[in-house]
Image (spheres, grey):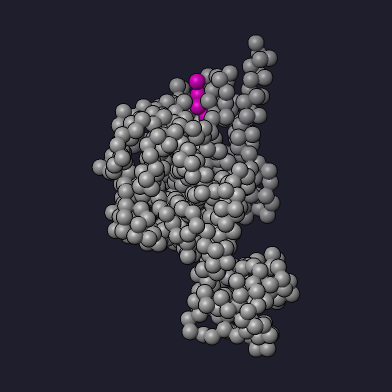
């Protein structure tokens, strides 16, 4: 790529670029947005952040060897390098990244999955189906980035556009023939996937979340809808008919396939049975019926399976690899992950549920599977949407027998203040009774240990909110923390106590 090509790609708004001391044939080695990562020959795109202005870092980028700057600002007087003005730096970097990496989404099918809940599991299911169909899948999502046979820790659900395009290109180099990626509302609003071609777009559901960023539910939905507005005429939108927003998404795309449990849809389950060991059903699809078995648990995972199967059907994948891909997925880290063993007299489950709707679904899934009491440990993240805190408190206490409120990732907020926000949702029921036994323990590890210790035989303990995460953000520190590891340690201590008692 050359500077002339960069200029031709960047939406300028009519303001001409200046090349400074460089010629149009100057080679470009990198598209960068972080001045600390700039390499010689880079084009530095000065993004406007929520709290910072990328033009502040132009001197550092030039000092590290950048040959050009793309910015939503006029060229400073006396600037000796190429300056390419734009009216939208985020769109510019997305289009530049797509061109720089030779448009990987046009060299292999990429499926985008969006929605509040279920994106990760649906993505894992789709990747498993594509693998079973011989279309080796890369995966980008909340838990990890899968590039060929390598798993990498995910920095964010949908990374910046340059990172997305670099990862997709690397997947092709490592033999991937398809890719599945979670597409967050932040990524859509910030144009991180603009310029991409999606082979299909999948909508799971829309419930309250991220209002600290979007402001209201209409803006949140508008961000999600962008994925379907981006689809080419031949790319299917895969839409959950049981969500109230389904009709608006159907109207946004030229081709669609629907799925659901309660509303009539193209893909629906029959003969559905569920237990703590998994589920099975028969899927009615436009390609015929198929028997499905899965080790995934609960009604929310029925929706995830329907979404993945509907996508695969729309892409022309045969029933056999669809059923095999669903059956061979053993589980998803931090999604209804059972951490107890058969030798334990209680069941402990770790789950990522961190919205009121996700927590409600989790508790409604767990309730019929709990022989005795249901104990819930959860908190809410700091510096995030505060409006969901009392809603989560209400859901947890209405649907659990025992609730321990604790810290999630408090970040810069005081954990005690977050807990008080949660407590505001704990109100008496219609009979004036407090819904459940409620305790607050700020230290998350202590809260998990307390729940496991106080559980009696046959109880089910849910640890909700962090799921697969391996760290906890407290103040300015990011500390090692793993719900799965802590719960297993607590279970081992419980077994040791019971052994001594015998």
The residue that appears at 52% across and 77% down in the rendered structure is 8
> Furthest residue to the bottom?
77
The answer to whether residue 304 is magenta is: no
Q: Is residue 467 visible?
A: yes
The residue that appears at 60% across and 35% down in the rendered structure is 484
The answer to whether residue 460 is magenta is: yes
Residue 207 sits above or below residue 441 on the image:
below
Residue 493 percent coordinates (x, y): 66, 24
Q: Is residue 361 left or right of residue 329?
A: left
Residue 462 percent coordinates (x, y): 52, 33
The residue that appears at 40% across and 34% down in the rendered structure is 320
> Furthest residue to the right?
63
Who is closer to the viewer here, 476 or 83? Answer: 83
Residue 54 percent coordinates (x, y): 62, 72
Q: Is residue 371 left or right of residue 498?
A: left
Who is closer to the viewer here, 11 or 76? Answer: 11
In the image, the segment drawn in magenta is: 458-463
Who is closer to the viewer here, 370 or 71? Answer: 71
Which image quarter is the C terminus in? Answer: top right
Magenta: main secondary structure equals strand
Residue 91 sits above or below residue 276 on the image:
below
Q: Is residue 262 left or right of residue 47?
A: left
Q: Is residue 419 visible?
A: no
The residue that appears at 72% across and 73% down in the rendered structure is 65
Which image quarter is the N terminus in? Answer: bottom right
Residue 185 percent coordinates (x, y): 46, 57
Q: Is residue 269 left or right of residue 54?
A: left
């Amino acid at each position: 790529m050359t500077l002339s090509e960069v200029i031709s790609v960047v939406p300028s708004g009519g303001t001409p670029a200046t090349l400074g001391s460089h010629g149009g044939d100057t080679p470009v080695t990198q598209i960068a947005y972080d001045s600390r990562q700039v390499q010689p020959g880079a084009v530095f795109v000065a993004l406007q952040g929520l709290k910072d202005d990328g033009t502040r870092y132009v001197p550092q980028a030039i000092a590290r060897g950048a040959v050009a700057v793309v910015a939503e600002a006029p060229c400073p007087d006396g600037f000796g390098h190429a300056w390419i003005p734009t009216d939208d730096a985020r769109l510019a970097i997305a289009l530049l990244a797509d061109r720089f990496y030779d448009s990987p989404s046009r060299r292999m099918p990429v499926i985008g999955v969006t929605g509040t809940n279920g994106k990760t599991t649906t993505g894992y299911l789709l990747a498993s189906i594509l693998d079973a169909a011989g279309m080796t899948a890369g995966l980008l999502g909340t838990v990890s980035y899968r590039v060929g046979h390598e798993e990498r820790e995910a920095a964010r659900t949908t990374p910046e556009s340059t990172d997305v395009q670099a990862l997709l290109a690397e997947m092709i180099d490592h033999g991937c023939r398809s890719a599945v990626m979670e597409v967050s509302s932040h990524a859509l609003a910030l144009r991180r996937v603009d310029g991409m071609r999606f082979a299909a777009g999948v909508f799971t559901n829309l419930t309250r979340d991220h209002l600290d960023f979007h402001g209201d539910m209409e803006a949140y939905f508008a961000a999600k809808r962008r994925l379907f507005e981006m689809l080419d005429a031949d790319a299917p939108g895969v839409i959950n008919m049981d969500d109230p927003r389904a009709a608006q998404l159907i109207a946004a795309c030229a081709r669609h396939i629907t799925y659901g449990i309660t509303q009539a849809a193209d893909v629906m389950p029959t003969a559905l049975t569920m237990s703590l060991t998994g589920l099975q059903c028969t899927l009615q699809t436009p390609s015929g019926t198929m028997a499905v078995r899965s080790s995934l648990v609960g009604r929310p995972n029925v929706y995830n399976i329907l979404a993945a199967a509907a996508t695969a059907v729309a892409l022309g994948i045969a029933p056999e690899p669809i059923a095999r891909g669903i059956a061979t997925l053993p589980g998803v880290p931090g999604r209804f992950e059972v951490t107890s063993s058969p030798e334990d007299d209680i069941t402990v489950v770790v789950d990522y549920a961190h919205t009121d709707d996700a927590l409600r679904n989790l508790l409604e899934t767990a309730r019929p599977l709990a022989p005795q009491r249901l104990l819930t440990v959860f908190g809410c993240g700091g510096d995030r949407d505060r409006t969901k805190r009392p809603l989560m408190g209400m859901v947890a206490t209405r649907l659990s027998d025992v609730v321990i409120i604790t810290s999630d990732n408090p970040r810069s907020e005081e954990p005690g203040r977050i807990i008080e926000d949660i407590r505001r949702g704990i109100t008496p029921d219609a009979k004036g009774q407090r819904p459940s036994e409620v305790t607050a323990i700020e230290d998350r590890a202590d809260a998990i240990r307390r729940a496991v210790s106080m559980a009696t035989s046959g109880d089910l303990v849910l640890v909700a909110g962090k799921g697969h995460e391996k760290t906890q953000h407290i103040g300015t520190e990011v500390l090692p923390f793993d719900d799965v590891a802590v719960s297993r340690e607590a279970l081992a201590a419980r077994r040791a106590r019971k052994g001594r008692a015998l």
